[in-house]
Amino acid sequence: MLLPTQFRGVEADYHHLRSSVQVWDVACERQVQLFGPDADRLAQLLTVRDLRKMDIGRCGYAPVVDANGRMLNDPVVLHVDVDRWWFSVADSDLVLWAGGIALGKGLDVDVHEPGISPLAVQGPRSEDVMARLFGDDVRAIRFFRFSVLPFDGHPLLVARSGWSAQGGFEIYVDDDAVACRLYDALMIAGEPDGIGPGCPNLIERIEAGLLTYGSDITRDDTALEAGLDRYCALDAPIEAIGLAALRRQRDEGVGRQIRGLTIGGPPVPLVRTWWPLHAGRGQVGRVTSATWSPRLNTNVAIGMVDADFTAEGTPLDVDIAGECRQVTVCDLPFPGSSQRSNT
């Protein structure tokens, strides 16, 4: 499925997202549904995050790894109902993996992709717009929680979540006709706030340290290398695929990790292939995503860096199509991104 990368221009979209409100068609975030008596067990097998305290009505970022601890997906997991979970997947699939695990373990659970397409409403004015459609009950939804609210007589799952640091909601739409009416109603309700169409923004997501699967993290990277330690229940008594491998890696030492980077010089081009990072003559990592930040007046980037060079302030060099630029290692998110921790 395709996803837009810009509407007004990447920088114009960035400023609009930080000041107003946007509607994103993120139907490419497919849901992998687990339903049945063994849904809870399968959900926990699929992620190294401890799901035991994730009650119905909660959602959370949950790394999915293979038996070696390497990343397969980094979905948001929703505990929708008794014996029902949704894995809202990123830029790879999970339905065949989940179905294979269920079959191999002999679990009593149905695994399939329901016809549900998320619509995101993001930006600092998103709550007021949503309240005009769903009433003030939407204001009571806590971060990474959801409620089922009616729109035009149709119940919709509404979560306070989304792939930006500016705050907002995701509406899980299960009816095509309702989706069209909802989109139009959002545009009308948001007119006083300058609403417009939008999409995940390159500048905003790098500033916020939001990783993309397939670019910043891949099947070659473990969850610990991806900097997702806080979502890995390394000491919990749970059964999860890949957890033993991550425990071994923690004990033996993590050899590289995702870090923030600033790159000197004029605005960088779009990263189409990874740019090598160097310390002296040796390569010590790669730049995976980069862009010019008009707010910070510098190039901001995300990269995978060898462990000996991850300290904040470490100077490195990057090779951008034969041009050497100075790089400084820093923490994520970048200052002023307004990111709230995923829970």
Image: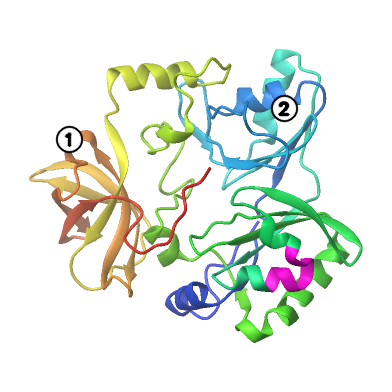
Q: Which residue is mark 1?
A: 308
Q: Which residue is at the front of the view, 50 or 28?
A: 50
- Give coordinates of residue 11: x percent, y percent: 42, 76
The quadrant of the image that shows the N terminus is bottom right
Relative vertical location of residue 111 with respect to residue 190 in this rendering, above or below: above
Task: Say what amino acid the circle numbered 2 marks.
Answer: Gly
Quick one: label 1, few (<14), some, or many (20+) residues within 10 Å?
few
The stretch of residues the image draws in magenta is: 129-136
Judge whether residue 85 can be spotted in this image. Answer: yes
Please give the residue where the numbered disc 2 appears in the rendered image. Answer: 99
The structure residue drawn at horizontal position 54% and vertical position 56%, both measured from the top left corner, is: 163
* Mark identifier at residue 67: none
Q: Earlier in the sequence, mark 2 or mark 1?
A: 2
Decide which of 256, 231 is in the foreground and name it. 231
Q: Disc 2 to disc 1, how far (Cα)?
A: 40 Å
Q: Is residue 238 left or right of residue 190?
A: left
